[in-house]
Image (tube, grey):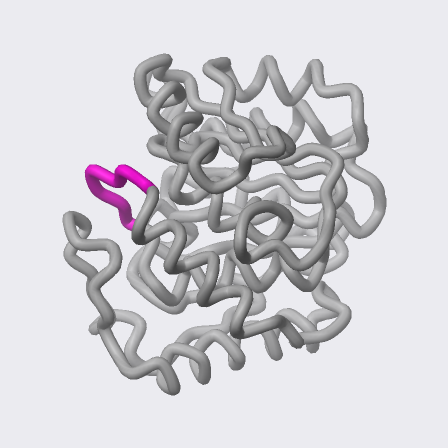
C-alpha cells in the first residue's frame, strides 16, 4: 500500500463547526499539501504538482463568504489538496457523490467554476440523496457559479452514476449508503461508473483512514493493480483521502 502521511496528521484537528479557522500558518499548509502532491506525481497519478495559489485563495474566500456550512470534516489542508488535484488534472466531467451542503463538491468543482476557476469543464455534478441538503448545496453553488456548469441534484449516487452518459474523468466519493451500508457504498458507486471511466480517470475517496474498516473492500479494489494503475492513501488529517488512477 502506498501512503503519504504528514508527521502531524493525528494532531491536526479541526472544529467541524468552524471550517474556516486557520489551524497553521499558510506556509505550513502549503508545504504539507506540496508533499502530498509530490507523492501523487511520483506514483504516476498526477502529471505535475503546479497550481495557482492566488486562484485557490480566491476560491477559499468565496466559500468563506458565500457558503452556508452547518459543519464539515473537510479540513483546510484537505480543501487545498482536493482543489489542487482538480486544478492539475482538469477533469472534463466530474461526479461527486455525497456532497451534503456542497462544501466537498465545490472543493472539487471550484477549480473549474467561480472565482478560483483555472480551466473549463463540461459537467461538474454533485449528488446528494437527502433532498433538503441537495437544495441547500445547490443554493450554495449558485452563489459561486452562475453558469450552471456546476450543479447539485437530489438522487441516489449509484443510480445516477450508472445512468451518466458521458465519460467520468474524476469521481469523488463521500457518500453513506442506506441500510447500514455506510461508506461501503463507495465500491457500489465506483462499479456503477467503471465502464465509463477512461484510462487515466481519477477516483478520490474521503475517509480512507477513519472509515478504513468499512471501506475494506473498496480499498482492496483500488489498491489491486489489475484495477487501478496506482493508489495512494494521503493522510493529512484524521480522515484521509485515497487517491487512485484507473
Residue 183: in sight, yes or no?
A: no
Q: Nearer the viewer, residue 106 or 142?
A: 142
Is residue 51 placed above or below 194 in the rendered structure? below
Q: Does the segment drawn in magenta span residue 71?
A: yes
Q: Residue furthest right?
A: 199
Q: Image quadrant of residue 60? A: bottom left
Q: Does the segment drawn in magenta span residue 234?
A: no
Count the labels in the image: 0
Quadrant placement of the N terminus: bottom right
Residue at 15% in and 56% down: 15
- In the rendered image, residue 124, in percent from the top left (x then y), is placed at 63, 35
Residue at 71% in and 20% down: 164
Q: Which residues make up the magenta segment?
A: 67-73
Image side of residue 132 versus residue 125, left or right: left
Residue at 60% in and 29% down: 148
Q: Image quadrant of residue 39? A: bottom right
Q: Nearer the viewer, residue 135 or 39?
A: 135
Is residue 62 placed above or below 186 in the rendered structure? below
Q: Image quadrant of residue 104? A: top left
- In the rendered image, residue 151, in percent from the top left (x then y), is placed at 55, 28
Residue at 69% in and 77% down: 42
Per the picture, the main secondary structure of the magenta-coloured stretch is loop
- In the rendered image, residue 85, in percent from the top left (x then y), is placed at 60, 60
Is residue 78 placed above or below 183 in the rendered structure? below
Image side of residue 244 versus residue 228, left or right: left
Amino acid at each position: 500500500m502506498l501512503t503519504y502521511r504528514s508527521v502531524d496528521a493525528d494532531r491536526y484537528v479541526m472544529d467541524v463547526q468552524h471550517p474556516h479557522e486557520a489551524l497553521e500558518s499558510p506556509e505550513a499548509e502549503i508545504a504539507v499539501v506540496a508533499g502530498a502532491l509530490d507523492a501523487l506525481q511520483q506514483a504516476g497519478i498526477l502529471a505535475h504538482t503546479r497550481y495557482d495559489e492566488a486562484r485557490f485563495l480566491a476560491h477559499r474566500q468565496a466559500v468563506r463568504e458565500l457558503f452556508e456550512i452547518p459543519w464539515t470534516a473537510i479540513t483546510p489542508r484537505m480543501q487545498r489538496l482536493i482543489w489542487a488535484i482538480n486544478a492539475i488534472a482538469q477533469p472534463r466531467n466530474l461526479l461527486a457523490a455525497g456532497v451534503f451542503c456542497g462544501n466537498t463538491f465545490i472543493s472539487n468543482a471550484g477549480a473549474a467554476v467561480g472565482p478560483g476557476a483555472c480551466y473549463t469543464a463540461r459537467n461538474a455534478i454533485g449528488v446528494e440523496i437527502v433532498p433538503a441538503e441537495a437544495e441547500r448545496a445547490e443554493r450554495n453553488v449558485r452563489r459561486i457559479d452562475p453558469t450552471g456548469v456546476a450543479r447539485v441534484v437530489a438522487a441516489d449516487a449509484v443510480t445516477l452514476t450508472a445512468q451518466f452518459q458521458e465519460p467520468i474523468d474524476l469521481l469523488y466519493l463521500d457518500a453513506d449508503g442506506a441500510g447500514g451500508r455506510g461508506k461501503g457504498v463507495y465500491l457500489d458507486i465506483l462499479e456503477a461508473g467503471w465502464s465509463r471511466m477512461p484510462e487515466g480517470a481519477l477516483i478520490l475517496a474521503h475517509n480512507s483512514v477513519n472509515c478504513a474498516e468499512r471501506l475494506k473492500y473498496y480499498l482492496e479494489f483500488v489498491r489491486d493493480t489489475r484495477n487501478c494503475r496506482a493508489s495512494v492513501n494521503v493522510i493529512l488529517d484524521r480522515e484521509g483521502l485515497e487517491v487512485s488512477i484507473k
